Image (tube, grey):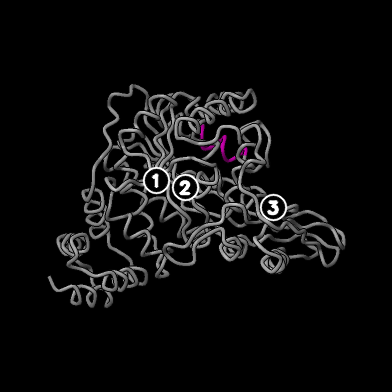
Amino acid sequence: MIPARLIQRKRSGETLSGSDIERFFGGYLVGEVADYQMSAFLMAVYFNGLAAGELDALVGVMLGSGATLDLSALPEPKVDKHSTGGVGDKVSLPLAPLAAELGVRVPMMSGRGLGHTGGTLDKLEAIPGFRTDLPLSRFVEVLDECGCAMTGQTAEIAPLDRRLYDLRNATGTVESLPLIASSIMSKKLAEGLTALVLDVKVGEGAFLPEEGSALDLARTMVAIGEARGVRTVALLTAMDRPLGRALGNALEVRESLDCLRGGGPADLRELTLALAAEMAVRGGAQKSLQEARERATSALDDGRALERFARMVRAQGGDVAVIERPERLPRAEVVVECRAPRSGVVEAVVPRALGWGVVELGGGRRALGDAVHPGVGFVLRVAPGDRVEDGDVLGEVHARSAGDAERGREILSGAVAMGEGPARLRPLVSHRVTQAGVEAL
């Protein structure tokens, strides 16, 4: 194999054979392909895509590069959820314990921030002591004890994806349909799942902003999962505005706890309930979406899901006291308000600008190895469609310094678009994609 030749062929739009894909990516694992060569190949894929055979080969080599979890000793269905990433997307935190209350086991392996979107692991690590680096043996023990466990991708699971994930984030190749699909599905197929629910974001703040591309991604991932015996469904959900009001790791943990107490923003609660119902039904633990939703609503409102979350936090070394005393979570040194410069209607809250704003404040990574400050971010006080008067508070900036806070004000002010007309928003959940096809909701 000559890496440069394969890069040239892919750059020119050729379709490579499955064995070509296996040799190139396998060579990367053993050092025969350098980071700079893989970066060039990923950029070629970004522009030219992958054919079905190429994608199947890539998923196979990524999955085969590591171990597969054996969860057969646990009798309940094993079901996970994966989001393609958004701004303010903290759903995994309330969802995992809630779905476990509905009768499924939730072995959730999550990632870190990617591009302008936050990562579940970074949010969980805002809880003092919480371990996201569990060995697989301990991960399975927590799953058995608590019904849910949340950890990072271990060295044993799809190690090829682990390396590509970081490289994509650093080289501007995140927003590629085949790279997204192969990354997600290689990890999920390694979890030993009965079923999988995919939350495919669409809108300005998503990696794939256009509905057509998001549907293509959903169909691709559903097909990959079903072909390997995992019952898979995808929901298209809105990312034309941030999800919830809190943006930033510790701030999003607080909002997740509000949701687990039966409160929190309406959109966060609604999406959590919808995904929990899909997980329970797809896994076979509940008969209908309506029944599953009713049970999920009860588990949120009566505190059972919160209690299960506390058990998981304790089992993974976290400070359980933050659940009753969220002020123990990391906090920013400076908190300032951002006020409306004039009266009008909030026509849009631009999620991508705010996502990059969190990164700029120190709540995400600009380069590999960057430290993350868990306390910084934004708390929105307005949503699209709200009427505001001159001087009303648009939101809060949580920053490390006065200079950062002033920059955060500029970012927040620029992300809130004011006008006189009504806001035009996507439905929170617009489509369901299964092996049978696409259903508009």
Query: How far from the left and from the top, in percent, is residue 156?
Result: 27, 45
Residue highlighted by disc 3? 379
Q: Could you tell which of marks 1 and 2 lies nearer the N-terminus?
A: 2
Q: Position of residue 67 (x, y in %)?
A: 23, 43
Image quadrant containing the N terminus: bottom left
Residue drawn at point x = 30 percent, y = 74 percent: 40
Q: Mark 1: few, some, or many residues within 10 Å (few <14, many ≥20)? A: many
- Tag 1–tag 2 contact (CB < 8 Å): yes
Residue occupying the far left of the picture: 1
Is 281 left or right of 407, judged from the image as shown?
left
Q: Residues within 10 Å of mark 2 (few under 14, many from 20)?
A: many
Q: CA distance from mark 2 to mark 3?
A: 20 Å
The tag earlier along the polypeptide, 3 or 1, is: 1
Q: Is residue 204 visible?
A: no
Q: What range of the chain is rendered magenta? A: 269-276
Q: Amino acid at mark 3?
A: Val
Residue at (60% x, 47% y) in the render = 250
- In reply to whether residue 43 is colored magenta, the answer given is no
Q: Main secondary structure of the magenta part?
A: helix
Q: In what element is the residue under mark 3? A: strand
Q: Quadrant of the C terminus?
A: top right
Q: Is residue 109 above or below residue 315?
A: below
Q: Which residue is mark 1?
A: 152
CA distance for labels 1 and 2: 7 Å
Q: Is residue 61 shown left or right of residue 185? A: left
Q: Is residue 122 above or below residue 307?
A: below
Helix, strand, or loop for circle 1?
strand
Q: Nearer the viewer, residue 243 or 119?
A: 119
Three-letter code for the amino acid on which mark 1 is drawn:
Gly
Q: Position of residue 338 (x, y in %)?
A: 77, 61
The residue that disc 2 covers is: 121
